[in-house]
Image (spheres, helix red, strand yellow):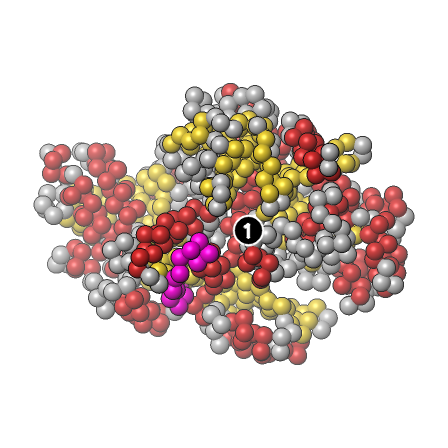
Amino acid sequence: MSRRDKMIAKIKELMYEPEQIRNIGICAHIDHGKTTLSDNLLAGAGMISEELAGDQRFLDFDEQEQARGITIDAANVSMVHDYKEKEYLINLIDTPGHVDFGGDVTRAMRAVDGAVVVVCAVEGIMPQTETVFRQALKENVKPVLFINKVDRLINELKLEPEELQNRFLKIFMEANKLIRNMAPEDKKEEWKLDFTDGSVAFGSAYHNWAINVPTMQETGINFKDIIDYCNADNEKELAQKVPLSDVLLGMVVEHLPSPKEAQEYRVPNIWDGDIDSPAGECMINTSPDGPLAVMVTNVSVDKHAGEIATGRVYGGAIEKGTEVYLVGSHGKSRVQQVGVYFGPERVNTDKVPAGNIVYVAGAKGAIAGETLCDPEHKIKEFEGLEHISEPVVTVAVEAKNTKDLPKLIEVLRQTGKEDPTVKIDINEETGEHLVSGMGELHLEVIGYRISEKGVDITTSEPIVVYRETVRQLSPQVEGKSPNKHNRFYITVEPIEPSLYDAIADGKIKEGRVKGKEAANDFMEAGLEKEEARRVWAVHNRSIFLNMTRGIQYLDEVKELLLEGFENTLKNGPLGEEIAMGLKFKLHDAKLHEDAVHRGPAQVLPAIRNAILGSMMLAEPALLEPMQKVVIDTPNDYMGACTREIQNRRGQIVNMGQEGDMARIESKVPVAEMFGFAGDIRSAAEGRCLWSTEIAGFEPLPREMQNQIVREIRQRKGLSAEPFPASHYLGDL
């Protein structure tokens, strides 16, 4: 029996021991060394050769990843690790670090219970490191810290032992501050990192060594010895004494929870169902014998096997050949194969029990965020995945040959399924298809993947996505139905900033508001008591309130009013961009007593006109997407880099200095960021490091608004100027 077969047999055995499983994600800022680290963990487990580890980038098996030298897709792998005479099954997900692929990190965090956050010792905690901490802690995933590239501090920066310790201490304190600010209330203390217990390790993923305080005590190796090994160019010997995989996987087993431990506190956080029901108890106890509950976190398409769903089994066991029910899309599907990942290949098993990360072939129609269960034991679906950022850059995609048009539509739909952070807008009338992504690189990769699926395409120049809102309270307006028998009186105003943030952070869920208990959440977020009890719906970070009293038949048209509210926000009055950050109040309504005269054809146009008309009277405004840009550069180039930011309408938020390096933190509109990479390199003669992160939407300067509105309307083939309020409301 080969070593590979032995390992596969062991994986199949350990799958049924939830206490001996660890589901972990490796996450970090771009280029901090995640994939190199994953390689060396696999080498330690005997899955790839130690010579190639670090150079091979085994988990970057997509050819775009190999070509660009970055991780684009989250990759899964299962391996076995011996620790203190016990064997453990480690299910590992290597996640991307580039801001454009942050959606993969969010999805991976739903599947794992613990995260190894990798931080480069030279660069320290960067914007994307903060984001991955936020993504992990929001999903109740416990973090540990690995400080990587320590060899560079010694060989390049020539730091002394004391300076090394200070550098580690600074990163450690910053990481703990993030945990203190973002961890669930009851975990803030418990999850605090601690040097002495070994929940922080440091080393070099590239040279395959790592150390933490318990290992130092066992081996007697101290900081001075590490410096001596690095200076003597003898890191190979160091790697034999303190191998990376032993130290790191030891830390994972010791400090990150097993599914048995984690599901107790994670399930109530991600599943709204009854915890005392058979399905709830089965998930809390990680039992393989009970109702099935699988959360799909990713979908990819394999040329031979079709759609492959990756997910986490929270309850029961998923078996090949059985039928599953898709809760979100209300469909049934027959599972053809199930199993675990072994890097780029998949290992089939008969079934996969609770507590494991699974791949499922044959779950047709599943998308990321879908819940799979037994058709006989239907369960409530898991909470949807909330991505931290949203698509802000769009390109129009067309097929080079018209005969490829049907295939292009199919490929675009497939792409939207594989990557839920991509927004696909297919317009079969005009033949123009819009693809929105997180940034230029994201769209480039999507374009490449569409061509890879056999469709030659041309793409337009990138277009920036704007949002619409209002700056002030509108007067009360009257929306009339076409038959003039139904009238709605509404006002609009900007939503309270505290409430907007609560919706953006997911503290208040979007959707129809059920019951009075939600009123407390709205009051906590800054709404007055009377208004908090009258919220009907939350949509696009906007709210709709019913301030009327005792109006006959209003309940019968409530659904139509809310449908009109949600649909109208898709196309604002300025440039048909999405509207957000609004508070609509229905003050009064006059309704025809005969139901025939107050159907959809009457109510929908009436509420739509009232919403658009009121917005035009409340000083409508455009919001533009912003990016946080952090630049680390030698002091001599600080002026040139600052000028580069200011020339792009950027605001400097913070500036700091450490030694001969300056850090500039700024906010720049996405519209001004095209071509930034080349310009900032020339400004600093290639001697700067920079990174970006999506930073939400902010009002466009008033003096630019008319010009941008005209450009948007021209591009969409609309009339040059937005319609005035009288167009929607009749004579005012």
Q: Amino acid at mark 1?
A: Asp
- Looking at the rendering, in which quadrant would you find the C terminus? bottom left
Please name the residue shown 58% across and 61% down the image. Answer: 67
Residue 581 visible in this rendered orientation of the protein: no
458 vs 489: above or below: below
Residue 405 visible in this rendered orientation of the protein: yes
Residue 600 lies left or right of residue 105; in this view the side is left
Name the image quarter holding residue 393: bottom left
Please name the residue shown 76% across and 41% down the image. Answer: 250
> Which residue is nearer to you in this view: 329 or 630?
329
Where residue 696 sits: x, y (%)?
Answer: 46, 58
Element type at marker 1? loop
Judge the density around disc 1: few (<14), some (14-19), many (≥20) Cα neighbours within 10 Å: many
Q: Does the magenta run of residues contain 30?
A: no
- Looking at this rendering, what residue extends furthest in the right direction? 220
Where residue 636 sits: x, y (%)?
Answer: 66, 79
Q: Does the magenta run of residues contain 463?
A: yes
Name the image quarter holding residue 730: bottom left
Where residue 54 sits: x, y (%)?
Answer: 71, 55
25 vs 55: above or below: above
Number of marks present in the image shown: 1
Where residue 645 sits: x, y (%)?
Answer: 52, 73
Task: Give the extent of the magenta segment.
Answer: 451-464
Please name the residue shown 36% across and 46% down the image. Answer: 539
Residue under numbered circle 1: 73
- Looking at the rendering, in which quadrant would you find the N terminus? top right
Residue 457 lies left or right of residue 694; in this view the side is left
Please name the residue shown 43% across and 46% down the image. Answer: 417
Residue 439 lies left or right of residue 660; in this view the side is left
184 vs 494: above or below: above
